[in-house]
Image: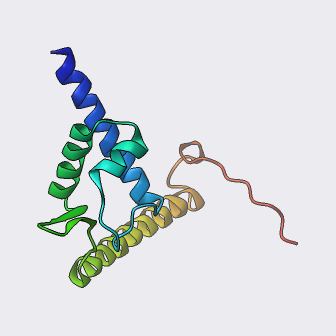
Amino acid sequence: MPVMNQTTSERETAHARIKGLIALGEITADLPISERSLSQRLGIGRTPVREAIKSLAEARILDVVPMRGTFLRQPSIDEVREIGKGRKALCSIGIRLSVRDRSSVIWGTRPRGELPRRTFPPPS
């Protein structure tokens, strides 16, 4: 059993570190991802790296293209639109909640102690 836990831990480590490389822009969509080079770069065996790549492909972060390689997945235009709609909805909810909380303090319908006090620099 300890070997299984170690492999699982290494797979999770590889998964997190590969996502970190993607977030930092060190893995790009134009070049194939090599298990061997990732394994060497991360200092982790190829099996956990392969499992992490498989997991990221299942999560639709990577695309595995037979006979070509594994690439960072590019979202479709429709997916980008959906993300934009989601962001817009979240922003509008945040604004409404902020205004509601702020106005309840201003109009005295909520005790002042419930919201954190913010200090702003004096106007120059």
Classify residue 30 by image quadrant: bottom left
Q: How is the image coloured?
A: rainbow
Image location of residue 79, percent across then percent down: 23, 76
Residue at point 53%, 64% (across, down): 103
Q: Is residue 113 above or below residue 65?
A: above
Residue at point 56%, 56% (across, down): 105
Residue at point 26%, 41% (across, down): 46
Residue at point 36%, 52% (across, down): 19
Q: Is residue 111 left or right of residue 7?
A: right
Classify residue 22 by image quadrant: bottom left
Q: Is residue 19 above or below residue 96?
A: above
Camera-side residue of 104 and 65:
65
Q: Is residue 82 left or right of residue 116?
A: left
Q: Is residue 124 above or below residue 44?
A: below
Image location of residue 113, percent across then percent down: 58, 42
Camera-side residue of 13 and 95:
13
